Amino acid sequence: MLLGIDIGGTKVALGAADSSGDGQLLARSQHPAETRLGPDAMLERIIAEARPLLAKAGGRATAIGISCGGPLDRQRGVVLGPPNLPGWTSVPIVERLSSALGAPAALDNDANLAALGEQRFGAGRGYDDLLYLTISTGIGGGILQGGKLVHGLGGAAGELGHQTLDPRGPLCGCGNRGCLEALASGSAIARSAREAARSRASQATELMARANRDPQQLSARIVAEAAAAGDALALELWDRAMGWLGIGIANAITILAPQAVVLGGGMTSAGALLFEPIQAVVRERVRLVPVEKLVLLPAALRLDSPLRGALAMAAELA
Amino acid sequence: MLLGIDIGGTKVALGAADSSGDGQLLARSQHPAETRLGPDAMLERIIAEARPLLAKAGGRATAIGISCGGPLDRQRGVVLGPPNLPGWTSVPIVERLSSALGAPAALDNDANLAALGEQRFGAGRGYDDLLYLTISTGIGGGILQGGKLVHGLGGAAGELGHQTLDPRGPLCGCGNRGCLEALASGSAIARSAREAARSRASQATELMARANRDPQQLSARIVAEAAAAGDALALELWDRAMGWLGIGIANAITILAPQAVVLGGGMTSAGALLFEPIQAVVRERVRLVPVEKLVLLPAALRLDSPLRGALAMAAELA
């Protein structure tokens, strides 16, 4: 029996699948992350949840795949301090879960495992050379070549959100200026809406109404909804962000020439409002890769992409 | 005996190596490309040169590797019409050379084979995940993952020169705007010098003196030489181009996290004037890949990188 564990900042999900590697979930559970409790209590909870889950699925764990936000040391199996998991500094999670549950374990970051999950079981089935982007509060990514994850130096490959697209642009959380993530992530769109609410207040009435007149409530979701309803300022902010996303994705396509690009993460719930402008920029700017043969698809496994990827990784250990 | 052939717009080089795949050239010849003669006469000349070369090296060909500019269809072995080889539209070069020389043949583009040549026999030895850039009149590239070339959809992977870095920037030969190649290639630097000679004539006296007062003679080499001599306008133009090159390389590093980046092509003869600013931008802008572990190196095989790569490809056929 394979056990997959996806540890996020808001929820922890566990799934069990049989060793065939077909990725079908035989049992699944999830609980709130309760990050204030710190890693020890969180790991105890995970172990406590795993046992009945495995019993329900009908077996004991033969291999464990763990998904977590970076930074992490995949080879040593240590979580190094993800921004969404305060207190998780140098947690030897592979050793801890492996000894508690009596099976070998492997660790990788959530974007890589989401890419793997989508390629094995989701929208990317059948595409061995695949690029996955998660577009959410941040922008992360994973690359598969020949059906295998590309990890790169320091396990850092696939950080598509940290391409420089506007050299003098806004400061990014990574320390660089003008990264795709600083221009087009959910956080970047929310920030641009707050700035516009201040500097262009007369145009921001619709946005502010949707945010209950509280600029702190402005979010990418509100901008997307106001844009869908035809609000001019929201459309401007949304289109600008989609233009940058389109360029970032076009650049990655130009460099890698993948067969498929799969987009996941919360912002993709905007649907055509997100896919259509990205598609248009890709068609305009990618000239040397035959884009008519490339598929651009929404992720199919939604919030379970990293969990399913963790199970695919576990299958390789078993 | 392996035969390598590198067909460029100015010269054609041939090399023979033994089947061990050690890449040592046992014999080498080259002749001017004479592109005005067209593909049939050029291929006759190549075949005529190959026979004595192989005889000199002491054997007949067991496999042939062919390097040529793109676009080409690697899988069908057909050259599709490289800009530097007028008249080479749909030339089935693999079939032609294979039947004339009685050995299986394979074709790939010059940037990919230069990457392979450097990885096997040049500056990139020992680095399985390698990024190669050729910086010349254009900017091309090749990617190796796990010691193997990444070809991608339509064989188009590695076109690092066609990342969009300045969305409203100058028109590129590919049809897009603001590509790295349109901002920082030898042709782009020469164009920026000609523009400056017109619009800022009083600052361009040093550049124009070096170009014999003929704006058409302004070149990237002249800009580099004037910059090295401390000319303010030349330094400004050169630094701006190096800034874009640095960003383009930083972006590719952020996406791929290679172990090594090897730079080849005519412009790298500028030495530290090119490497130092690129290195500085990479250090500033790449935050998630451990750049202190990454090596940035000049190509070691110089003009023979694609020829040696063609021999490495032939070794896989033999």
Image (cartoon, coloured by chain):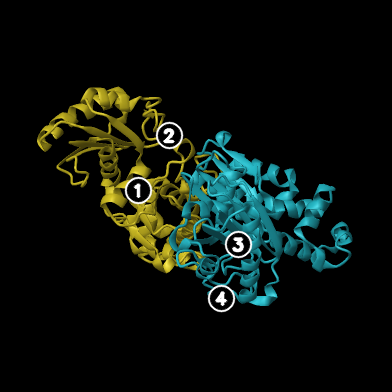
Chain colours: A yellow, B cyan
Which of the pair B16/A198 is nearer the observer? B16
Q: Which of the 4 image quarters holds residue B292?
A: top right
Q: Amino acid at mark 2?
A: Pro
Q: Nearer the viewer, mark 4 or mark 1?
A: 4
- Residues at circles 2 and 3 in contact by the CB criterion of under 8 Å: no
From this view, report whether residue B144 is shown above or below residue B69: above
The kind of secondary structure element at disc 3 is: loop
Marks 1 and 3 in Cβ contact (< 8 Å): no
Disc 1 marks a residue whose amino acid type is: Ala
- Give the labeled residue for mark 1: A115
Q: Are marks 4 and 1 on the same chain?
A: no
Q: Quadrant of residue A177?
A: top right
Q: Secondary structure at mark 2?
A: loop
The residue at which mark 4 appears reads as: B89
Left or right: residue A61 compared with residue B213: left
Image location (x, y in percent) of residue B119: 56, 45
Which three-letter amino acid code belongs to the residue tagged 3?
Answer: Gly
Q: CA distance from mark 1 to mark 2?
A: 17 Å
Single out the mark in the foreground, 4 or 2: 4
